[in-house]
């Protein structure tokens, strides 16, 4: 019960890394706001958590809509009475996966869509509206889910790399600005992550160990959300199987 008494809002948590974070947080005693655009998937995550004895609520969230971000934060506090933990995990993966091209070939709309979903909405707006509640709770933890592409140059993903690089920088800024309010902020740099049970998880192109699974990131997020990491802030922590230190990509 490392997270007993915590209330966590996890953006983009109806599948993948976000879902694993929600489920692990709930097992560790946190009450969890599961968020995303797809109601059916979100409700399934909530049902699994409740069936296992945890407390969770699905709250619809579109991080590209500022009002939606504001309303999601307020709904979380209304449901659970407080907010102690913000996990910024959402990303416009549908746009990123269909916009693999040289920087000079991006349209302005494509560029702006990725920056909006991965940086403006998922870090700026979420943090802007969550911080007053974290302060009211006596402090808390913000964890930004970053990417190895923020550190290693990979062709075709310039906008996403820019958004995640910005996330790393903003992490340090938030840590400095919010320290007087006992709010910590850290980021996790993630390598390639595949679904649980994926037979490709043992294959490791560019990684020194293996490909990741969502629980690998959830374990790291749990540490950063827990009081045991109270002395850790402004850190960019890698959980990437060695991806960002290996020159062979």
Image (cartoon, rainbow, N blue to C red):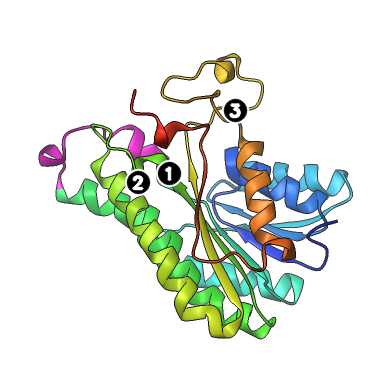
Q: CA distance from mark 1 to mark 3?
A: 17 Å
Q: Is residue 21 left or right of residue 210?
A: right
In this rendering, the label closer to the viewer, 1 or 3: 1
- Residue 193 lies, in percent from the top left, at 53, 31
Q: Is residue 93 left or right of residue 227?
A: left
**Label 1: which secondary element:** strand
Tell me if residue 27 comes above or below residue 239 in the rendering: below
Which residue corresponds to mark 3?
Answer: 195
- Residue 72 lies, in percent from the top left, at 57, 67
Viewport quadrant of the N terminus? bottom right
In this rendering, the label closer to the viewer, 2 or 3: 2
Name the residue furthest left: 104
Mark 1, Cα crowd under 10 Å, few <14 / some 14-19 / many 20+, is many
Q: Is residue 37 left or right of residue 39?
A: left
4 inside magenta stretch:
no
Viewport quadrant of the C terminus? top left
Residue at x 34% of width, y 44% of height: 151
Which residue corresponds to mark 1?
Answer: 147
Mark 2, Cα crowd under 10 Å, few <14 / some 14-19 / many 20+, is many
Name the residue furthest right: 53
**Label 3: which secondary element:** loop
Q: Earlier in the sequence, mark 1 or mark 3?
A: 1
Tell me the quarter of the picture where residue 85 sits.
Answer: bottom right
Look at the numbered discs 1 and 3 and tell me whether their residues touch, using CB distance below 8 Å: no
Residue at x 63% of width, y 68% of height: 231
Residue 150, numbered circle: 2
Magenta residues, as a range?
A: 93-107
Tell me if residue 97 comes above or below residue 160 in the rendering: above
Look at the numbered discs 2 and 1 and tell me whether their residues touch, using CB distance below 8 Å: yes
């Amino acid at each position: 019960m490392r997270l007993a008494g915590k209330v966590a809002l996890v953006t983009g948590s109806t599948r993948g890394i976000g879902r694993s974070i929600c489920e692990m947080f709930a097992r560790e005693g946190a009450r969890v706001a599961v968020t995303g655009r797809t109601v059916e998937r979100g409700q399934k995550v909530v049902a699994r958590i409740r069936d296992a004895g945890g407390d969770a609520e699905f709250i619809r969230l579109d991080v590209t809509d500022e009002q939606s971000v504001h309303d999601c934060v307020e709904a979380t506090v209304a449901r659970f009475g407080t907010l102690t933990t913000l996990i910024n995990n959402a990303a416009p993966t549908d746009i990123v996966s269909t916009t693999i091209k040289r920087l000079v070939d991006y349209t302005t709309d494509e560029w702006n869509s990725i920056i909006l979903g991965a940086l403006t909405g998922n870090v700026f707006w979420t943090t802007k509206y969550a911080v007053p509640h974290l302060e009211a709770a006596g402090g808390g933890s913000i964890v930004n889910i970053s990417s190895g592409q923020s550190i290693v140059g990979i062709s075709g993903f310039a906008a996403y790399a820019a958004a995640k690089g910005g996330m790393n920088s903003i992490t340090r800024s938030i840590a400095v600005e919010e320290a007087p309010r006992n709010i910590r902020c850290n980021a996790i740099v993630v390598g390639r992550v595949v679904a649980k049970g994926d037979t490709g998880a043992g294959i490791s192109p560019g990684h020194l160990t293996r490909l990741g699974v969502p629980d690998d990131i959830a374990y790291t997020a749990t540490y950063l959300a827990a009081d045991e990491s109270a002395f850790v802030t402004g850190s960019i922590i890698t959980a990437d199987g060695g991806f960002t230190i290996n020159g062979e990509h």
